[in-house]
Image (cartoon, rainbow, N blue to C red):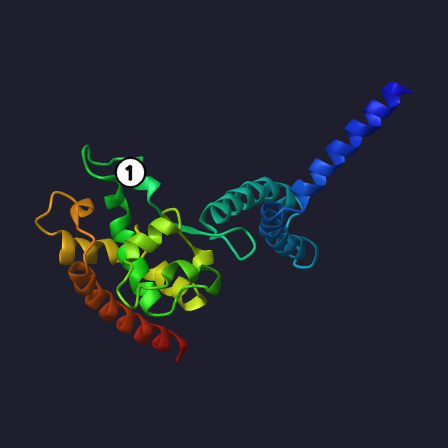
Amino acid sequence: MSILKQAWSATKIIAGALFAVGTSPFARMMALCFLVPMTVVCALVFWAGFPANLLWRTALPLLLLSVALSFRRALNRKPEKGEGPVVYDKAKYHYDGDYLNGLARKQAFVHTGMFVGWLVEHDMIAKDFLAETEGFKERRITGPEIYEAWDGCLITDILTDEGNRFAADYFDFQHGEFLNDYQEVLAKGLPSLYHVKNTWQNYEAIRQKINLRYENWKKEQKRKMA
């Protein structure tokens, strides 16, 4: 009896795993990529008079192609709402990584903190995170200090919808222009971008550059919607 119970438990586990795999986005995409062209092939064979062996000659290549396309889409797919927040930056990525010896850890909060300050000034912070921003507009607390109060983590949950749209285009470290602007405006002539000081003078300098980028970004968004 115990063997039967164990077999039944194992069967349920396997069935559950197969169901999860079969209903996953990857499986659905693979099925779509395979079934659509196979439907066309079937139509050619059964209604257009093409040779029947066309089915067997194309089935395996189409299956392999569907797997490859599904893998590619899965790797390139951006997280959607409900899949968890997207991380723009974390201070620990910098001070735990290729960080300069002897440099104060707080310097790892400055570059992203400057952008945080701009977001606060432009009301692009979600209401649940506004408490830590009190005093910024009165210049009683800096952007890097706010960023540090958020444990050095800037994620999508912290920003408004517009803030996320702009940050995704401009602040993205691989494809955006923020780091280039930061280097040009504040870090030119310094040993690294981590040597930029957390001062209001520096904030005002990068603020003007971000303002120009933001205005151009808004114009581009309007053009795309036209």
> 196 and 47: which one is in front?
196
The picture places residue 141, in percent across and down from the top left corner, at: 29, 59
Residue 203 x %, y %: 21, 61
Q: Amino acid at mark 1?
A: Tyr
- Image position, residue 216 (x, y; %): 27, 72
Which quadrant of the figure contains the N terminus?
top right
Residue at the extreme left: 189
Label 1 crowd bin: few (<14), some (14–19), many (20+), radius 10 Å? some
Give the quarter of the image for residue 200: bottom left
The answer, for residue 135, to whether it is visible in the render is: yes
Q: Nearer the viewer, residue 170 or 148?
A: 148
| Position of residue 39 in the picture relative to residue 120 (left or right) | right
Screen quadrant of the C terminus: bottom left
The front one of 209 and 48 is 209
Name the residue at 36% across, 47% down: 152
In the image, residue 14 sits, relative to residue 128, either above or below, namely above
